[in-house]
Amino acid sequence: MDVAKELLSGTILAGARAIRWLDDGDPRGARTLAEIFPHTGNAHIIGITGPPGAGKSTLVNALISEQRRRGRRVGVIAIDPSSPFTGGAILGDRVRMGKHTLDPDVFIRSIGTRGQAGGLARSTHDACLILDAMGYDLVLVETVGVGQDEIDVVALAHTTVIVGVPGLGDEIQAVKAGLMEAGDLFVINKADRDGYEDTYRQFELMLHLRAESKALSSDDWSPPLLRAVAVKDEGIAEIVDAIDQHKAMLQNTGEFGLRSAQREREQALTLTCTEIMRSIRQSADPAILSAVEKREIDPYSASQLLIKNWQEGRGT
């Protein structure tokens, strides 16, 4: 099978195989990505993130249904936490979206984090490119339950949806640090629970403070605060409407292409850093590391020596 050719024609098996190669670090994945890369940059990448227990998977399931009602092909990347002991992942998020598995215009893939921090897996970016090349109109990326500073999805997505929920105690504390500043849409899910009004007021206040912290121009996006009960499909159409409005704004201002370009630029730098780190680890002088262990040399000085030795070893 010519995986790249089949992938560009939308063949599910080819897409699944390419994602597996990329997730496993198989060289065939990088070669395939190089072939299909010129055909990417069209899909709308939508990040769905928030604290554990917010009902993200149920919300994504409802969003798939609404997007399909609007005639769109939907890709889904669901990130599941991997065990720090075995490296395995339950990949249970896909189970909650089971009703869509037989739809040929929906591609759902679960990926384990394999120890990657930030709410995403290391191959999430590549998987999005694969689904993009396969012709999916949008890709929903559901993160693991993130902490306050785990905002990798913001750099990946064109549109970031922050999901909160009543009943977590301090709802804002669960998402406030980086996500509150970076989210494009805010959704309070499970809004039929007690405490919804208090949670809404907390989010409303935080968004008000966010707006006051910077001078908004007429072209800036004012993030909406939406209500949803995903298990009952309540509020889902309004969320998709808001996502569409945000995409339109990005396209009208040229920001859509800029975000895509910035994402690929940062990915190239990230891969470069990873490769350099691997090379330095392999060539590191044990004597320098031993000196650090014995406190004969400080880590900063050791770092400079390791880099210098690595550069000299490569003739640079």
Image: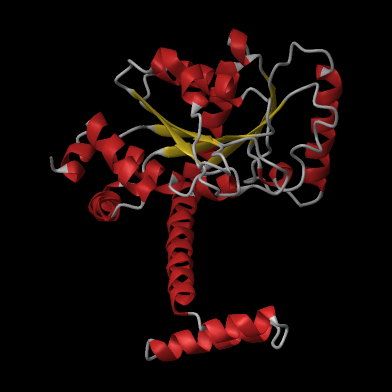
Task: Please name whichever residue, 128 or 92, is drawn nearer the observer in this view of the structure.
Answer: 92
* Residue 221, image x, y percentages: 64, 41
**Looking at the image, is 191 positioned above or below residue 48?**
above
Residue found at the far top of this picture: 232
Q: Position of residue 266 (x, y in %)?
A: 49, 60
Query: Residue extending furthest left?
Result: 1
The answer to whether any part of residue 129 appears in the image is yes
Hey, which quadrant is residue 47 in on the image?
top right
Report x, y in % for residue 29: 29, 50
- Number of labels in the image equals 0
- Compared with 288, 271 (above or below) is above
Q: Which colour assignment does the render follow?
A: secondary structure
**Residue 220 occupies quadrant:** top right
Q: Is residue 253 visible?
A: no
Name the one closer to the observer, 93 or 184.
Answer: 93
Q: Is 144 or 310 nearer to us in this picture?
A: 310
Looking at the image, residue 308 sits to the left or right of residue 6; the answer is right
For residue 220, side relative to residue 68 (left or right): right
Compared to 281, does 98 lie above or below? above
Residue drawn at x 68%, y 36% as measured from the top left: 223
| Residue under the image location 35 percent in, 52 percent down | 25
Judge from the rendering whether residue 301 lies leftward or rightward of residue 96; answer left or right. Answer: right
Q: Residue 248: x and y, percent?
A: 50, 36
Q: Is residue 217 above or below residue 95?
A: below
Q: Quadrant of the C terminus?
A: bottom left
Quadrant containing the N terminus in the rendered view: top left
